[in-house]
Amino acid sequence: MSENGGHLADAEFTTTAAGYAAALAFLNARGHVIAIGVEGTSSYGAGFTTAARSHEHPVVEVYRPDRAERRRIGKSDPIDAYAAARAALSGRASSTPKDATVAGIRALHNAARSAVKARTAALNQITHILFTAPESIRARFRHLNGTDRTDALARLRPAGDAVHVAVLTALESLARRVKELTAEHEGLTRALGSEVTTHNPGLRAAYGVGPHTAAQLLVTAGGNPERMGTEASFAALCGAAPVPVFSGRTNRHRLSRGGDRAANAALYRIALVRMAGDSRTREYVARQTTAGRTKEEIIRAPETGHRPGDVPLPDHHGHRPGHRGPTAPTAVQEHHAHPRRPRHFGLWPTAISNLERGLRHDDELASTYRDWLNAA
């Protein structure tokens, strides 16, 4: 595509080293390359992205085409290619692709997650089989739960009539599978913890950040988190940035439904762990509970830049029929009349602020976290 948005040429290439070289030669033959827009730089487009960047071509991440536009003009490889080129040319796509240095962490994290899913499926199968098993089998294992039941089933020696043998064989097989998957997950978790600690020891040392939580945040940020210039950009990436929903005299924000939902869940787990075990966070929760807020509101209520405990949080969620929460004091109402855009929600400022800084400046994370605790 030309500088003015005109179509120059399009072609298809194989996803091999030879194909990448041919694609780059095709681009260079059409003139000076300003930018290359690639959809899926961390997945299906990772190979071409690496090849293009090795030749010092600027590559930008292009998100999938707008669904309304796709319904209107159709779907094909040339259409998608031109859409990516237009996004890169217009500046609508400007994100720097993620670095590949966290590829190992991503692989271990995905393998561990799949082991948990398979283990859960096997445990559910055991439960369902026991629901319909003969009464003698049900009575034998009815009072066992968790690891005790799995261990007992794994030691079974099927005997009896055909039905009993078949059911006991299935239960034994599933129990052995559960034990194998448990051992596999523990091994992957150890490897993942070692890899994450080596890659970013400050993040791993932060309170409430376990191996899987740290891995998810690193995968979301990529190996080059400097592409996130501010704390707000990291909050938006994690789906924790408030979204304005102003209309007429209605002046409020709502939770974001976008962003990386896995990273969003990781921040939520961090908040829950700190609510349970961190003294400063528990004091903050106690103050907000006394003010009449629920646990969900404490975690997700908009944070407008004030330190927790400075002033009550303004009610950015507006009036809700039947809502029995406390009425905001006059000072808070005056503040609400001239609102500032919230940066992120509730207890998440702690996680977002420190994790974002820690991802970019590893050696500063511990001191930054302590400073926040002292200020809270």
Image (cartoon, grey):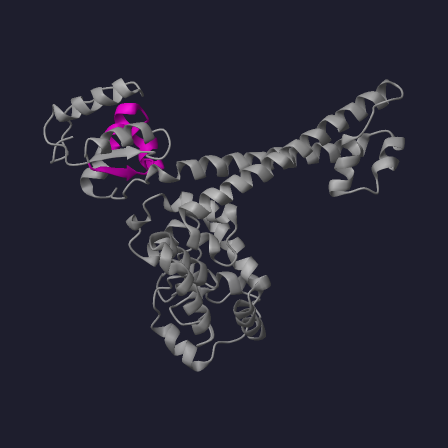
**Left or right relative to 359: residue 73:** left
Q: Is residue 83 magenta?
A: yes
Residue displayed at 15% across by 27% down:
7
Give residue 18's position: percent from left, percent from top.
26, 18
Q: Is residue 216 above or below residue 344?
A: above
Q: Quadrant of residue 231?
A: bottom left
The answer to whether residue 216 is seen in the rendering is no
Give residue 254's position: percent from left, percent from top.
43, 58
Give residue 247's position: percent from left, percent from top.
36, 61
Give residue 339's position: percent from left, percent from top.
35, 70
> Which quadrant of the figure contains the N terminus?
top left
Viewer-nearest residue: 131 or 54 = 54
**Left or right relative to 99: residue 285:** right
The answer to whether residue 85 is seen in the rendering is yes
Residue displayed at 80% across by 35% down:
152
Q: Quadrant of residue 370?
A: bottom left
Q: Quadrant of residue 58?
A: top left
Viewer-nearest residue: 30 or 5 = 30
Q: Is residue 157 magenta?
A: no
Residue at the outermost bottom position: 330
| Residues in magenta, as a range | 58-84
**Left or right relative to 50: residue 58:** left
Q: How many marks?
A: 0
Q: Is residue 47 above or below residue 16?
A: below
Residue at the outermost left position: 31
